[in-house]
Image (cartoon, helix red, strand yellow):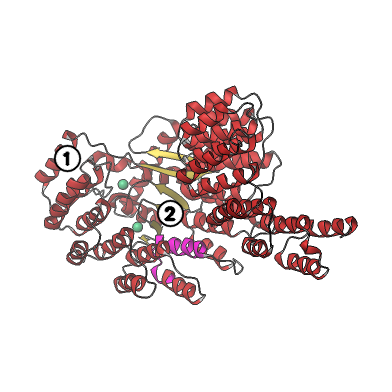
Amino acid sequence: MSRLQQQQYLSLLSNCKSLKTFKQIQASLQKSGLDTDPFIYGKLLLHCAVTISDALDYARFLFLRFPNPDVFMYNTIIRGFSDSDTPQNSITAYIDLRRKSFAPPDSFSFAFILKAAASYRSLRAGIQLHCQALTHGLDTHLFVGTTLISMYGECGRVDFAKKVFEEMREPNVVAWNSVVTACFRDDDVEGATRLFNRMPAKNLTSWNVMLAGYTKGRELELARKIFWEMPVKDDVSWSTMIIGFAHNGCFDGAFGYFRELQQAGMRPNEVSLTGVLSACAQAGAYEFGRILHGLIEKGGFTWLVSVNNALMDAYSKCGNVGMASLVFERMPGTRGIISWTTIIAGLAMHGHGKEAIRLFHEMEESGVRPDGIIFISILYACSHAGLIKQGSDYFSKMKDIYNMEPAIEHYGCMVDLYGRAGKLQEAYEFVCQMPVSPNAIIWRTLLGACSIHGNIKLAEQVKQQLSELDPKNSSDHVLLSNVYAVAGKWKDVAAVRRSMSEKKIKKTPGWSMIEVDKIMYVFMAGEKNNKITEQAYEKLREIILRLRVEGSYVPEIGSVMHDIEEEEKEDQVGKHSEKLAVAFGMTRLAKGVTIRIVKNLRVCRDCHTIMKLISKVYGLEIVVRDRSRFHLFRDGSCTCGDYW
Ligand code: ZN
Ligand code: ZN
């Protein structure tokens, strides 16, 4: 082959992105008999394995066809499979290289195969490879040493990683970054910081590694400091901050970084968008979600499945499952199992059981195979809509049609299904007959059902089981005290509460969140220390006065506090955080705007009544997301049908 021909083929190859074009180039090489040249064949193989997506198997086919592959070709295959789903193919190629090849493995072979061992998390294989590198005198090679550090870090041996690092004569910035990453993986934030401060030179990755490590280690202040010190920031830096803050429940921070990213003139990417949408979903920040939706449409991100999935999730969790459905309908033939799960879970949360069932059926028709997670969603949907027959049918379907073994979560859904519907005996028998031993969550679900339906005898039995499994859980005690309260057994109520204080069991404080002008306001029960809460209290007093007159409201003081973990003092009922949040929303939001509240605990009976009355007397729509579901209050009634 002439040099010119070689150049022509190589330039053709460098522009080739699809497997189809690649095969055409390969065919033409073959026709002219040029594909026997190991140099050209090696380039061909490399392009197929590394550049073209989803072509690894074809690369392996090409590799096996070549009579005597050289080390370069072996390395290409080892490299290609090292971060694939099947790293074992790298190992096979490496073993072949040692057995069949005329030349020994080189530094690249070791670097790539160590990467495969790391993605396998196989410490044993890693140590063996380390020894082999040692015999070949390659263990101190910069490239090999760096991958050894990462491998030991991945496999949880940060001590080995540090030792390799210390033995390196002149570690470069990549080696420094690897050892810092290994420290973070071991939750050693201080060690990572010390190393970072000692680094002779830093690159962009060094900074990004620190951001990821700090946010993972909940050191948000440190992350913030590093972020603003960075001379240059890239996509990864921004999205790491957005996701890191969102994961730590610091939603305002996540929103803030997203805004800053836009102000810096950068275009958001898939990662930053899904990160900020997840913050929206958790915070219930509906208005911000709508702005993001606009941005997604305008910015041409609608073809990204993960962004659509995150948008649907945000809409459902912000209380607008209708918009979530709209996004789902418009997803152009790209719905994966996660998309179906997101929309079905959204419908379930809002009590639209029948619609969830319709979509589940549609999904099966379209040929998508359900997985364990979507079965949890559909069972939850049936349970929250009181569809007992359909729920148990799905449970059987899992085993009979799809040959799947139900996990403890699926059993939990079934207990909830029977329990909610008041079929407590069935629920109890179901638990006793489970092939796996029931955990505290299962018993707690049953206890919750006893509390709703006032079955003291069963509640005591169940509480006994819970005391053995999880003695310090506050909600169990409050649930039991509620069961007694329903039956008017005040002595027993007092006994449960006494035992709680004796065991020093702390209750989770209740809070509610509301978004006004894109700012999230958080209210705590009984809190009275700033202008905002004072304003809310004043409005609340006015509201209650009007409700007493126009809605014949009588406070449910002294009755059961359904707010199961908190706020049990009688005079506290009037100060529950969701009441304050609604009152505050009514002073600040424009007329006719839906009030959206996120609450961390279950909404209590009294608050529920107030919300219904407000919706009627003031002609307002209120959406409350509590710990168990959504409530949409409109015209004096709630979508949960007073059953939650
Ligand atoms: Zn309440
Ligand atoms: Zn409700």
Question: Residue placed at 26% from the left, 36% from the top?
Answer: 506
Identify whether 158 is placed above or below 268: above
Label 2 residue SS = strand
Residue 134 is covered by the magenta coloring = no
Instruction: Give the foreground label among 1 and 2.
Output: 1
Q: Is residue 567 left or right of residue 621?
A: left
Identify whether 215 is placed above or below 446: above
- Which of the pair 206/479 is nearer the observer? 206
Is residue 167 among the parts visible in the rendering? yes
Q: CA distance from mark 1 to mark 2?
A: 33 Å
Q: Position of residue 393 (x, y in %)?
A: 32, 74
Residue to which mark 1 is pinned: 497
User: How many numbered badges does the structure rendering display?
Assistant: 2
Q: Is residue 66 left or right of residue 159?
A: right
Residue to which mark 2 is pinned: 622
Q: Check disc 1 and give the amino acid type.
A: Arg
- Which of the pair 398/547 is nearer the observer? 398
Question: Residue placed at 56% from the left, 31% from the top?
Answer: 224
Q: Position of residue 8 (x, y in %)?
A: 86, 59
Q: Position of residue 123 (x, y in %)?
A: 46, 43
**Residue 514: mark in rendering:** none
Q: Which residues are magenta?
A: 337-355
- Which of the pair 129/517 is nearer the observer? 129
Mark 1, Cα crowd under 10 Å, few <14 / some 14-19 / many 20+, is: some
User: Image quarter for residue 6?
Assistant: bottom right
**Mark toward the start of the polypeptide (1 vs 2):** 1
Q: Check disc 2 and give the amino acid type.
A: Ile
Residue labelled 1 has its Cβ within 8 Å of some atom of ligand 1: no
Q: Is residue 587 left or right of residue 56?
A: left
